Amino acid sequence: MIELFQHIVDGVSLGAIYALIALGYTMVYGVLKLINFAHGDVFMLGAMIGWYASARWTSESASPSIFGSIWVTVLAMVFCGVIGFVIERLAYRPLRAAPKINSLITAIGVSFFLEYGGQYLFGPNPRAFGVLPHRPPLSLAGISIGYVDLVTILTSIVLMIVLQRIVFHTRMGIAMRAVSWNPSVAALMGVNIDLVISFTFVLGSVLAAVAGVLYASKYPSVHPLMGLMPGLKAFVAAVLGGIGNVPGAMLGGLLLGLAEQLVSGYTSSSWRDAVAFGILILILLIKPSGLLGRGEAEKV
Amino acid sequence: MAGFFGGSALKKARRALWSWLPWVIAIPFLMLIEQKLELNPDLGLEYVFQNINHIGIAIILAVSLNLVNGLTGQFSIGHAGFMAVGGYVSAVMLMRGPQEDPWRLFFILSILTGATAAAIAGWIVGKPSLRLRGDYLAIVTLGFGEIIRVIIENTPFFGGAIGLSPIPHRADFAWIWAVVIITIIIAKRLRDSTHGRAFLSVREDEVAAEAMGIDTTGYKVRAFVISAFFAGVAGALSGAFEGNLAPQSFTFVRSFEIVAMVVLGGMGSITGSTIAASVLTILPEYLRALANLRMVIYSVALIVLMLVRPRGLLGTTELWDYLKRWRPFQRQRGKREASEALIDVRHATIRFGGLTAVSDFSLEVKPRELVALIGPNGAGKTTVFNLLTGVYPPSDGSIIIMGRDTRGLQPHAIAHLGVARTFQNIRLFRELSAFDNVRIACHHLTRESMAAAVRHGELSGVEERWIGERADELLEVMGLSHRRDELAKNLPYGDQRRLEIARALATGPQVLLLDEPAAGTNQREKVELMELIRSIRDRFGVAVVLIEHDMKLVMGVSERILVLDHGVTIAHGLPREIQRNPKVIEAYLGEKYAREHFGGAPA
């Protein structure tokens, strides 16, 4: 029983990270109907910037501090926000009128560019990452909650509440939802679509940056290809919850993290990648619009 | 005497010769190159040939994926998975099979087994997931591709994460390129056949394709299975060429690379895929001097190419399109007669949730009859057509077409029974020529199998000629001969409407359903169109059911009129009776009459 709870705690912590990445996928899909395959690599960039920042500024003081780690995270967020803005501006905006498959290929190109660019600058080997101060794990009735996991879960909850406020209670959030419903009508109603799309990319990238720093702290290492699998799985999470749906991405991330942790905990960790894709296929065959998504029918 | 050894037998032999000639000529040529160049140590071309062989394998992959992503318009990004299946199955056979294989018959067997395994995997993946569209299909194929890899990685029989090595080295230049040629020829012949047009029609507009009698799901699965088969061949060749297989080389990144080749070459273009496969394989090699930067440049090149040429290098055209010759044509064909009711709808009702769109609708259409279905906007006229063509099944009541209950029939099966339609919002295959639009609709009249199309058999030749003539005849009837080779999307509006009618007629219908054919045309054109519809009826002996807003117009042309309002049939009878029917005047004519007399624009 304790083992089960332990897995659940670990699963929630992993799922929170997936959820943070999945939000970026789902918001971009919502406004652009584009699968931004480069999103996983923005997540990697977040971790990498975190590594550079901590190497430059925080390692002088002997041990990492809370303020140091916040500073590092904010820097990663700003940088990734800019990167997200630039990617959309240069690679996706010129192709907005083109068939979707073209933007998808461009997204793949951007993804390759970030990965190989990362390998060129950073080197292909993993580097150790330690931003958060070392604290002993919290022990609750036999279940140990790692300090990193605790920070991850708390940070994610705060960010998701903030995001919920942005999406549902601000002018920009209303504009985002309008664009996702119907871009041309939104434009006719005076919504600046370009601005909304840029904002969505920046918002998603900022969340990915936080996820990157948290993920790199959890498995304390950074390398240029670290965005591949978490990126794909977060995408699966977005589809699971219903792509384009913000609460869906949170739910999907949590469920996926839990499922993965339970399967790798009780069987073998080598099957964990198959779990995500198995779930994906099942959900698409049974309810393609996802758990919280809405279906669409074609008019003849 | 001549009958014994001449005539058709000779013709057959000649056709057979032509159909097999390309493969036969190519092979000794390839072997010569291999003997003189690749295996000649003095020339030092090992590295060059290694690249050439990589290109060959990439071409097989790109051309086969093009069948799904380009021709059929489905978005698959799991091609590497099928490649892995083919590669591993054949590699296991080669490693455990006889070590001596002088004629490489066992090698051929292993390739075919691997490819068949891949095709079966393709069927298993495709059958359930091809119901999905666009992005969702892409993700599912990606997921399946990854699962195949994870399974291989966890199966000790397949070498686990380390992979298989050493695989007997059986594939070399001549083998790989012979397969490349075979793949390209098969792809080209499939594409140019009636099956190729069926694939294209699925890409362009699935609803219209079904209405023209094409089993869209069936064709998607077929495209998927054939494509997986060749991916399996490529995998088998790759294993037997490299001497080892590792699961890491079959990740989705590999699939992405193949998709990039197809898109970059131009969706559906076989020559485009071939060129793009070569360029994208060579490019990283050329950049090798730049060491770590080469993949960065490769990815930038990919993005820039996509931005500069969003339709790919060749668009949807082929290199050989520029060499195509003009085909002369002839015409005249017989008509058919029938006696009993062609369509018999009894008390059909359809509900969408709480809304009853059409209730208790009955209609009988006799041969060569011209029936008009009129009613104000939202009366349920198009819904009636959707019921008749099987787009929606009725909630209640029965629809009998040619004496057959259509319950449970797919739209394409109903089209086969002899019902063809046009669409209110024109649904042509926009990226195809007028000629091809009409030819696709002849699809279900052909009997040639896919295998025959690939062999370039006799029947396929006869049928292709017949379809061409038929299409040209229909284009002429509709006054579109001069637009024959223009893309449907470039035709003027009126021509598009007429092309839809030509396309519907090409299915060889007994009943033609025209959904507001006169929409958007002016009064004079409308009158001309009605004349045309009458002459089509006389010439092709079809019954016509016509949806039209303009009541005055249908008065002259139709023999019977049925008036719908809010899904209810409020009147049914001869034009004269309808004109005097007080209910009609109240619900429909009165309002419209008033509107026309007070200067409003006609609907």
Image (spheres, rainbow, N blue to C red):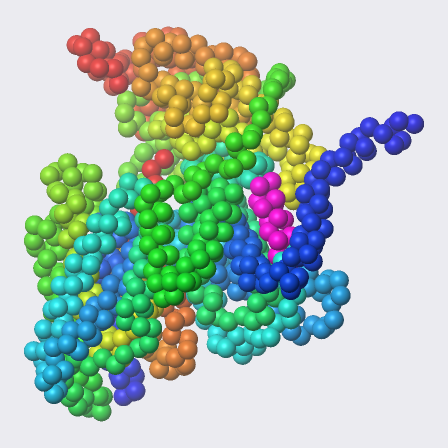
For the residue pair A246 and B75, the one nearer the viewer reads as B75
Q: Quadrant of residue A159?
A: bottom left
* Residue at screen point 59% across, 63% down: B44
Can the viewer see residue B373? no
For the residue pair B435 and A263, the one nearer the viewer reads as B435
Q: Quadrant of the C terminus of chain A?
A: top left
Give the farthest residue toward the right. Answer: B1
Look at the image and give the residue range highlighted in magenta.
Answer: B175-190
**Magenta span has B184?**
yes
Can the viewer see residue A88? yes
- Left or right placement of residue A116 versus residue B438 in this view: left
Position in image of residue A252 (x %, y %): 27, 65
For the residue pair B488 and B250, the one nearer the viewer reads as B250
- Left or right placement of residue A255 versus residue B245 in this view: left
Position in image of residue B3 (x %, y %): 87, 28
**Magenta span has B284?**
no
* Residue at screen point 31% across, 19% down: B520
Count of all numbered marks drawn on residues in the image: 0
Q: Main secondary structure of the magenta part?
A: helix
**Vertical placement of A45 versus B389: above or below?**
below
Give the farthest residue toward the front. Answer: B42
* Residue at screen point 61% across, 45% down: B186
For the residue pair B282 and B369, the one nearer the viewer reads as B282
**Vertical placement of B369 versus B172: above or below?**
above
- Left or right placement of residue B7 versus residue B87 in this view: right
Position in image of residue B532 (x %, y %): 45, 12
Q: Quadrant of residue B385?
A: top left
Q: Quadrant of the N terminus of chain A?
A: bottom left
* Residue at screen point 63% across, 40% down: B453
**Vertical placement of B552 versus B515: above or below?**
above
Position in image of residue B395 (x %, y %): 39, 40
